[in-house]
Each structure stands twice: as structure tokens, then as C-alpha cells.
Image (tube, rainbow, N blue to C red):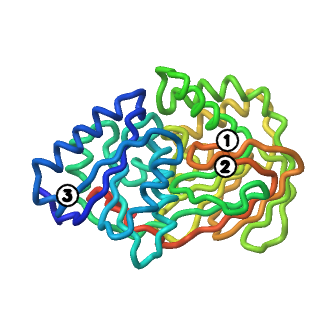
Amino acid sequence: MARANLGSTLVIANPASHSGKGAAGAEVVRRFFQTCASATTAFDLQLTEATGDAEQLAAGATGRDTVVAVGGDGVIHEVVCGLMRIDTAQRPRLAVVPLGSGNDYARTLHLTANDPERALAELLGGGERLLDVGHVTSDLCPEGSYFTESLSFGLDAAIAIDTTRRRAQGTRQEGSGLFATSAIRLAARASKGYACTATVDDEEPLELTSLIFAVLNGPTYGGGFRICPSADPTDGQLDLCYNVRQPMMPHLMALLGLARFGRHTHSRMVRLRRMRTARVQFHDDVPCQIDGEELPGTSFGIEVVPGALRVLVSRDFSW
């Protein structure tokens, strides 16, 4: 049974998510709301057809009480970007029914992935929390974009972008296995790093040769790699992981393996810290990903937007 009525609800679903299983998942959600009249006062379901559709639909959700994103991290990213275009006082709450390959935001919310019925039960039996989001601008994207889970530059970004492309091409690999095989393909190519100047929270600038410069709102990305294990999406800060040394190739691959379980944090190769703002200037073009999507540029401004979204979470949500 629903713990509370979600009010007027808009469901935004990507039918192509999870290798085409999103359409079936969207139908499960439709049937649930049709048969469980106590869950909403009214609901509509809209299927996306192209990149950008979910953002536009969410941006037009003024007057709704809840927007439900059905799909992977990509459609969740778009829905959040759309919701952030709505004035705070009118912004609907966000609910997520995760159907994807990576499902990192679902991990942060402690929701079961790729099982719509169970995810709906967890949402309706859980609670509502105010969660932070990140925001980034670049010299080639001055209006910027929001992110729910991750923003990164360098090797890990190249890997994340590669996994997105491989999913679009129909690979059967998922989650951390997909991330790992992309890492093996790209590690040698990007192992020299990317020179940059980084200023964090207006402190003294850092001169880095970045293999990884990852800014996280939740603990994981890449399908469960615990890059910032202590990241808390409710603390009004973002977590940063960056390399301070250049590992040789065997050490680099070992470090990636340790990151699967968050054990890289003990390495002298990397530093972890919390931050509210950062400015990063790369000397040349650099791979950059935001929630798995490519973001062009060489100069970036990053900030946290504390408590920006009301989000339905599992009752196991522990932050």
C-alpha cells in the first residue's frame, strides 16, 4: 500500500533503456498506477523518443506534485535538468524507477534496479528527502548542466563516455563489467594524463596531470565503482577524488580494480576531499562526462546546489 498519495503525477519513461526493456518497464508502471488508485490523484505517462525529450517534459511539469523518471541514469539526468528549470516553490518532487545498465543514482537512493514493481514498492514505502545536486558550466556550454551523481574528467570520463557509446551500439555487457572492459581498452591511450590547473573552494591552485578528477554527489559511478565511498547527497557538499601521482600501467590497472570496492582511497596516488566549488582549466581538450553524458570544453566551473530536490527514497536510505 502507498504510504502517501503522490498527487498529480507525470511519469517520464525511456522505452529504449536497458537494451529496450524500458518499454515493458513503463507498462508495468502504467498498470500499477491504473490499479492502485490510492497512489495518485491523477497520472500521465509520456514516452521519450529522442535525446532531450525527458528534460523538456520535466521542465513543463509545473503544477504536478511528482515526476517519476523511468529509465537509466541518462533519463534521470535529463529529468533533473528539466526540474531544475522550474522555480523552487513550484518544483515537483522526483521519484525514480531505475531501468538501466549503470543505475548509480538508484544505488545512492537505495532502490532496487531493473525490477519496477519492487522499486515502486520501495518508493511508496519509503520517505522524502531533500538532496543536493551539482552544477557545471564550461567555456563551450556557458548555460551549464546539472548532475545527480557524477562529473569527471580524464581517463575515467573517457571510459564512461565509451560505455555510453557501447550501450547505444547494443552491447550485452552491463554495470561494472562494461566499465572494466572499457577501462582495459582505453587505459593505455589516456595514461599520460591531462594537464590542468584546479582551484577548489578558492584555495591555492593545484597544478595537476589528471588521470582522474571526479566530482561525486553519491558514492558510485561506472555501474558501482565506489570512487568516493563517503559521498553524502544530503550534506551540502560534493566529494572530489583526484590523482596526485602518475602510476605506471600495472599500478593504474590495479588502482582501477581497487576502486570497484572503494579500496583505492588508501593509495598514495590519489586524494579525496569535500568541496563546494571548483574551477578547472585544462591546457588541451579533455574527455568530460556528466552522469554518463559527454560535456565539451576545456574550462569548467563546478558548484553544489544544496537541498535542491525533494526526492522519494527507500526507507533503507541511511544518510
Marks 2,1: beta carbons within 8 A: yes
Q: CA distance from mark 3 to mark 1?
A: 35 Å
Residue pictured at 66% horizontal, 31% vertical = 254
How crowded pointer 3 is (Cα within 10 Å; few <14, some 14-19, many 20+) is rated as some
Q: Is 89 positioned to the left or the right of 260 in the image?
A: left
Mark 1 lies on residue: 157
Residue 250 to residue 45: above or below = above
What amino acid is labelled 1 in the image? Ala
- Above or below, comparing residue 234 to residue 259 in the picture: below
Location of mark 2 (residue): 152
Give coordinates of residue 10: x percent, y percent.
31, 56
In the displayed structure image, the side of residue 166 where residue 5 appears, left or right: left
Residue at the spot of label 3: 125
In the image, 132 versus 61, the foreground residue is 61
- Tag shown at residue 255: none
Q: Is residue 303 left or right of residue 33?
A: right
